[in-house]
Amino acid sequence: MSTESIYQKVVEQNQNEPEFHQAVLEVFESLSPVLDKHPEYRSAKILERVAEPERVILFRVPWVDDKGEIQVNKGYRIEMNSAIGPYKGGLRFHPTVNLSILKFLAFEQVFKNALTTLPMGGGKGGSNFDPKGKSDNEVMAFTQSFMTELCKHIGANTDIPAGDIGVGGREIGFMFGQYKRIRNEFVGVLTGKGAGWGGSLIRPQATGYGQVYFAEEMLKANGKSLKDKVCLVSGSGNVAQYATEKALDLGAKVITVSDSGGFILDEEGIDREKLAFIQEIKNVRRGRIKEYADKYPKAIYTAVDSSLDHNPLWDVKADVALPSATQNEINKQDAQNLVKNGVFVVSEGANMPTVPEGVNVFLDAKVLYGPGKAANAGGVAVSGLEMSQNSLRLSWTREEVDGRLLNIMKAIHKQAFDAAEAYGTPGNYVNGANIAGFLKVANAMLDMGCV
Ligand code: NDP
């Protein structure tokens, strides 16, 4: 069957899942030269199998809010592929969560995890629960109910969830406590744990740091560096905060951050003191990014205007874009605006933040474009290192973990760079990342037969 027919079948059999279709199409489109060279993948039906989750778990999450009223949310875990290791991938708590979004994330995770050089399969999960405006008590009630069901399906050698949008240290703590209480075992079943109870140093920083290391590697391959470059960051959560910090470490200037309400533009640059204020707004007070402009009046706040056909955050003069909020946050017009304004490096911290037409704009303009699958793999890589430390029952130093993270990001860059060249599209990190990740998973699936 042709790749196009296999894709059509995926669409037919997974209706109303546009994000999942988008992620599958992007990978399939990169694979033509691989399938021409290796017909054995076709006869073993590898494409048909990688696009079908090994298991999908869907469950009810009832909990009681502060007013004593019962609330009901949906819980999900997609166990996508375990060919090279136990399922591994984050949990997302956001009102937009549905099967399509989690399947796209789980699918991407399979190839991303393969690129990290560590033995991890791919999965993803979460809930349509909205943590915004909820008290700590309500978040605990929800997460305990969520874990009461999830704990039947996960385990340190089976499936090891982590954080994602809406799931940070607080939520991982509540979920780990509930898992331990029900299963009566203290094991590395979640990553992103607190440093005092099995967590790895640098895990909170890892995705943002890795995203910036990846940008630096792409620049280095072209004889340049991040020093003195002007960067646009979107989001102001976990990934955005640490992308900003590492960009500062490497001598760059970050002039924007955002949340779902709008963005701030600070032409003077976000320094460490201002970054600490963002962290206080977002991690402690759980407030809105608008407050930044109240405290630093030279910064300009622009509220989201849904009547626009573009996001004005991406229409600011700069050198580097570090999208770190959510999927499909850069449309075709945004990509054109970025190129027009001089942006020549895009390193994605978010998963699939650029629509396919936008990716084509970057590739046509020869932008150094690092897709999320490669550029944001630092988070799951350090999760893998957290699992290693848990198995060894010891903790590595900050320097040790950061050094390993840097080496992993270099290795991911090299694999994507080399695969792009070997299969005829030099400089195309989309093809390179998809091909290198796919080969590792596909070869393991061939070795294991029809399972
Ligand atoms: P957080 O919840 O910490 O932060 C998310 C940020 O993005 C917030 O500023 C949030 O604004 C904004 N945002 C979320 N949804 C939307 C939306 N629909 N429209 C506009 N803004 C939005 O999440 P993370 O930083 O962990 O995740 C950010 C991205 O990075 C996601 O795509 C995630 O999948 C990806 N990622 C995360 C990893 C990790 O280790 N955490 C690993 C790899 C990828 P608001 O506060 O208003 O909601």
Image (spheres, helix red, strand yellow):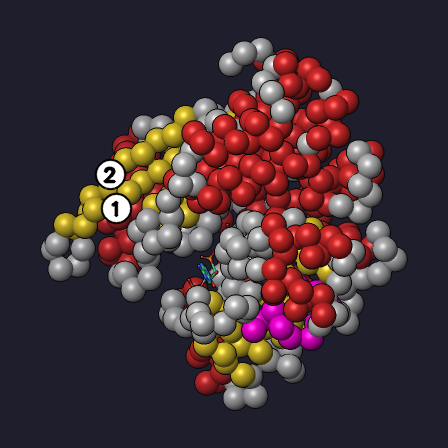
Which residue in the structure is indicated by mark 2?
60
Q: Is residue 36 magenta?
A: no
Image quarter where the N terminus lies is top right
Where residue 123 appears, x then y in whole percent?
Answer: 48, 34
Mark 1 vs mark 2, CA separation in Å: 6 Å
* Residue underneath mark 1: 73
Quadrant in the picture for residue 186:
top left
What residue range appears in magenta? 312-321
Query: Which residue in the rendered view is the most extreme toward the right?
Result: 223
Residue closest to the eye, 46 or 409: 46
Residue, x 57% and y 27% (percent of image)?
Answer: 5
315 inside magenta stretch? yes
> Are there few (<14), some (14-19), or many (20+) residues within 10 Å of tag 2?
some
Compared to residue 339, the image places residue 264 above or below, namely below
Is 6 located above or below residue 180 in the figure? above
State the residue in front, 389 or 258.
Answer: 258
Percent coordinates x, y for residue 420 in the rendering: 78, 39
Q: Residue at x 67, y 65 (%)?
A: 336
How far across and down, in percent of the image, does residue 256 sit? 59, 73
Residue 253 vs 122, above or below: the answer is below
**Residue drawn at the location 52% of the way across and 64% of the way down:** 235
Count of numbered circles on the image = 2
User: Which kind of residue does numbered mark 2 sit on?
Assistant: Arg
Measured as percent of width and height from the top left, residue 338 is found at 67, 67
Judge from the rendering whether residue 74 lies leftward or rightward of residue 290; answer left or right.
left
> Residue placed farthest to the left in the image?
68
Left/right placement of residue 192 relative to residue 221 reads left
Please, what is the three-letter code of the amino acid marked with disc 1? Asn
Say the numbered circle drawn on residue 253.
none
